[in-house]
Structures are given as C-alpha cells and as structure tokens.
Image (tube, helix red, strand yellow):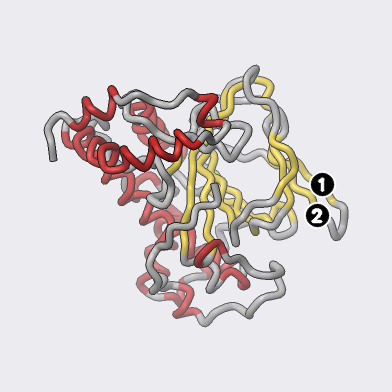
Amino acid sequence: MSTDVLSKARNVLRPSREEMLQRSPVVNQFWDENEGVFENAWVEWEAKGGDGGITLDRSLYAPKLRHAIEQSWKDPANEGLVKDLWTEVFPDVFEAQFFDPEKLAALREYLDHVADAGIPLRPPYGLVLNRGGAMLDPRSEGYLAAPNFQAFYSDLMDHFMRPIARLLFPDVYGYDSQTFGFSIQWEAGKDTTLQAHSDASSVTLNINLNLPGKEFSGSAVRFMDPATRQVKDLTFAPGTALIHHGSAMHASKPITEGERHNFVLWLYGENGQIPYQHGQGQKLAPRDKRWTLPQVRPDKFAPF
C-alpha cells in the first residue's frame, strides 16, 4: 500500500453535496474509481492512530445483554435470557438496553474521529435527514472501512442482531442473511421530519447513541398499526434500541432542540428478499438454527 494513500484520499476532488443528493452519474463514477483508495486510506488512518486508540469491542454493550448473548451462543437453551430483556412497547415493536450508557462516550468519540478523518464518506442520501450520517456496510459505496469498526459492526450484526431478530420475529429466519446499516445525526433547526414509511428490510434495529445528559426534544419515532389504527410516539433513552419488522409503518417527528444520533441496521435476504407478509411466514426455526451464521456469501444488493 502506498504510504501517501491517506493524503490522496483527503485531497481527491469530490462531487458537490447537491450532486450527491441528486444522484448525478458523476457520483457513482467517483465512488467506483476511488473505492480502493478510500478502503486503504481507512486502514492507514487506523494504523496511524487516527481513531485515538479507541477499541470498539463487546465492552460497549449493556452487561445483561452481553452476558445473555454470550451464554446463548454457548448453549442455545439459554436464549430465554435474551428474550426476557426485550419489552413489547407497541405491537411487534420491542425495546431493550443495548449499549451501556456509560460506555457510549467512547463510541461517540470514535465517530467524531471518523468525521474528522478527512476521508470521503457517503451519506445515507436515501433519507431526507442525513447531515451527519455515513454508510456502515461494505455493500455500500463510500462506507466506513476502518478495520476495527468493521470487526465491531460484523460482530454486532452476526452475533447480536440476527439471533435477537430470529427470537422476536419467527418469520425472518431465511430472510436475514444480508446486512445493511447507516448512522444518522439529526439537528434542530436543520432537519425537519421523516414522513411515514416502511423499510426495505425483514427487520430493523434502531439504536439511540445520544450520551446521558445530552437531551433532545421532539424527534420521537411514531409507529402506526394499520389493523387497529393505533398510533404511538416512542422515545428511547441513551443506548437503548427499538427493533421491529421493516414493514412496520413509522415516521420521525421533527426535532426541536439538540441533536439525535442513531445507528439504523437492517437484515434481509439475498437480493433484498423479505418475508411476503410479515407474521405469516414459516414458524420459528429450531433453537439450534437460530444461533447460527448464514452460509451464503454477502451479495452486492444495496437498498440505497
């Protein structure tokens, strides 16, 4: 690897934000032509200590969740420990403490170092609200390719999110081999609202990365149940997560004060396949199947 690849990545001529948001043809060309440069730049950035020496590992997780997950991988008969941590706060929407609130500062500091790295990152411009976000998954162009982050992200998706999804939503098994993720940062006075929509996922995990004491106002996630016409606005504390079927109708209300930081993570099947009708698919997979890794390779399909 050339020792000046980091400088090359930082100095490359970039498309304008308007071109990115309009998905101009020059944008795809930009990411395609520089893919290797940016991936190598993240390796060099990490090797040179650009991450501030912060290691992302399982110590970031809420201790009860980490213990339950690790015990269940050792013996799937322990999976009740995991399921008991999740509370149904709306029909088929569950909440739990996911990250340790006292450890979030390290993750947020890491992400601040990422933002200051000067290496181009593709924002999640499939969304209206995307001012501070980045793509997390290798299937996405311009993703956060730092090796330490990718190891953390893969462990999160494979060993935490997927078995949790299989436990709570029986129909997603077999439609959960592929991963997708992005981060978002919404700021009062700049980001308004995200209209009602469903996700192109089998299941979605939304994790609040706000630090304790760093409050924000507004920006609740509104869920709607078409069958009962029930509507509920949900807010969640630092480090907590909401998990739901991708087909669940939801929206984000306007943020009125402060900032909101999140990871939004998806699972789906090959080439974007999701259950035909959530809740009407196959029965819960055998316990020993839930605690396994998919045997298919990641494909190249990206929802946006």
Q: Position of residue 83 (x, y in %)?
A: 56, 64
Kind of residue sitting beneath label 1: Val
Mark identifier at residue 150: none
Q: Is residue 81 visible?
A: no
Q: Secondary structure at mark 2?
A: strand
Q: Is residue 90 visible?
A: yes
Identify the residue at image location x=46%, y=38%: 101
Kind of residue sitting beneath label 2: Asp
In terms of depth relative to the viewer, which is nearer, 85 or 44? 44
| Above or below, comparing residue 63 to residue 233 in the picture | below
Label 2–label 1 contact, CB within 8 A: yes
- The residue pinned by badge 1 equals 231
Q: Position of residue 174 (x, y in %)?
A: 53, 73
CA separation in Å, label 2 and label 1: 6 Å
Identify the residue at image location x=41%, y=43%: 141
- Does residue 40 appear to the left or right of 142 in the view shown? left
| Above or below, comparing residue 182 to residue 66 in the picture | above
The single residue placed furthest to the bottom in the displayed view is 286
The single residue placed furthest to the top in the displayed view is 189
- The residue pinned by badge 2 equals 225
Identify the residue at image location x=40%, y=38%: 29
Q: Secondary structure at mark 1?
A: strand
Identify the residue at image location x=22%, y=36%: 46
